Every structure is written in C-alpha cells, then in structure tokens.
Image (cartoon, grey):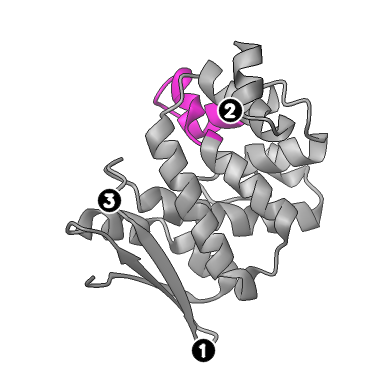
Amino acid sequence: PDLAIRGEVPDPRRRSVIDLARRCDWHKTHSEQVASLTMRLFDELRPLHGLGNLERELIEYAALLHDIGWHIGRKGHHKHSMYLILHGDLKPFSDEEIQIMANIARYHRKAHPSPKHLPFSQLPSDHQEVVRKLSAMLRVADGLDRPHGSHVKEVACNLLGAKTISINILGSTDLTPEIEAAKAKAKLMDEVFHAETVIQQESG
C-alpha cells in the first residue's frame, strides 16, 4: 500500500495527510469538497486575511482531515479529529504545523477558539490568530456541503466596504439547505473579520 500511495501522491506532506485520512476511513467525497470550497474562500478573501501560501497548504490539509474523528465516534468528532491529527504520525510536518492543523479541525464546529481551551491557549498568539481565521473559513465551507451532496460548484466573494463579506455560490440545484447551514456557521467569520457575512445563490 505504501508504494501505491507513493506513486499516486508524490508529495510527501500531502501523502502523509491522505494516508492518515485513509487509515481513519475518511468521508472522501465530502472532505475533498470541503477542502475545495475552503481553498476557494481562502483565495477570494486574501485581501481580508492577509495570509500566505503556507497557511493555504495547512488549511487544505486541515479541511481534508476535519471529519476523521468520526472514526472514533460521532459525538465530539471535532475533538477526536484533533486528537487523531496530533497523534497521526504526520512526520513531514513540524510540531507547530501539526498543532495548527489540529486546532483548525477541532474548531470546524461547535465552540469558537477560546483561551479557556488548553491546546489553543498553548499556541503562540500569532498561531492563535491563524487558527481563528482559517477555522472561520473552514466552518463556512463545511456548511456549504451540509447535505454532503457536493452541490456547490463555484464560490465568489466580494468585500463590500469594510463591513460586509458577500459570498455568492453557484450550483445546478436549489442551494437553500447549504446557504442556511453556512449562515449558521458564519458567526466566527463575522467575529474574526469584524464584518457581516452574506451568503446567496446566484442564478446561472
């Protein structure tokens, strides 16, 4: 199996992530869709978050791994995801990178990042800010695939002044369930970027 994945995924960092995902019986289609939507949000919102290519790589891998905690159980699966990433033998990554990815996955649902949470509070302040920004985007992307149907085909963002983030989505079906789920998960984005997130379907 190791030789097969080497040929299939030549990059050692990506290969270690995919290997961990497979070991945890990941929800491949949903995870890849959420990763794709997260990357799109990251690219579209670059003027807002000001992060670079390393953070882009880490958020993609965190998105691919965000649901692996289901391997342990449904209840608290976001916390299980964090545990599995921290202990997943991701050798090509530094300890700091693993901590960031694990925290992003931990905050894809439920509570927002908080100093009351030990793993988060132990991060340097600049890494805490990275986790806040990246988990905010992951939460919205996860909402945009809420029914796990990969119905959202395109995402475009506009910054309307300093106060509004407009997210327009395209798909061939009614995306009301995805919009409602993403809106419910956009509170962290509003909080982190001091703006209101507006999500709507474009006709197309």
173 left or right, relative to 178: left
Q: Earlier in the sequence, mark 1 or mark 3?
A: 3
| Residue 167 x %, y % | 40, 70
Q: Residue at x 44, y 24 (%)?
A: 70
The span shown in magenta is: 65-82
Helix, strand or loop status at disc 2: helix
- Would you say the magenta stretch is mainly helix, strand or loop? helix
Is 108 part of what is drawn in magenta? no
| Residue 118 x %, y % | 70, 38
Q: Which mark is residue 151?
A: 3
Q: How far apart are labels 1 and 2 at the CA level?
A: 39 Å
Q: Which residue is mark 1?
A: 161
* Crowd band around label 1 with a 10 angstrom C-alpha radius: few (<14), some (14–19), many (20+): few
Helix, strand or loop status at disc 3: loop
Quadrant hosting residue 23 = top right
Mark 1 or 2: in front is: 2
Q: Which mark is residue 142?
A: none
Looking at the rendered structure, the kind of residue marked 2 is Ile
Q: Earlier in the sequence, mark 2 or mark 3?
A: 2
Looking at the rendered structure, the kind of residue marked 3 is His
65 left or right, relative to 147: right
Looking at the rendered structure, the kind of residue marked 1 is Gly
Q: Which residue is mark 2?
A: 18
| Residue 50 x %, y % | 69, 69
Q: How far apart are labels 1 and 3 at the CA level?
A: 29 Å
Q: Residue at x 37, y 61 (%)?
A: 154
- The N terminus appears in which quarter of the rendering? top right
Tell me if residue 164 comes above or below residue 39 in the rendering. below
| Total numbered circles | 3
| Residue 57 x %, y % | 67, 48
Query: Do labels 1 and 2 touch, CB within 8 Å?
Result: no
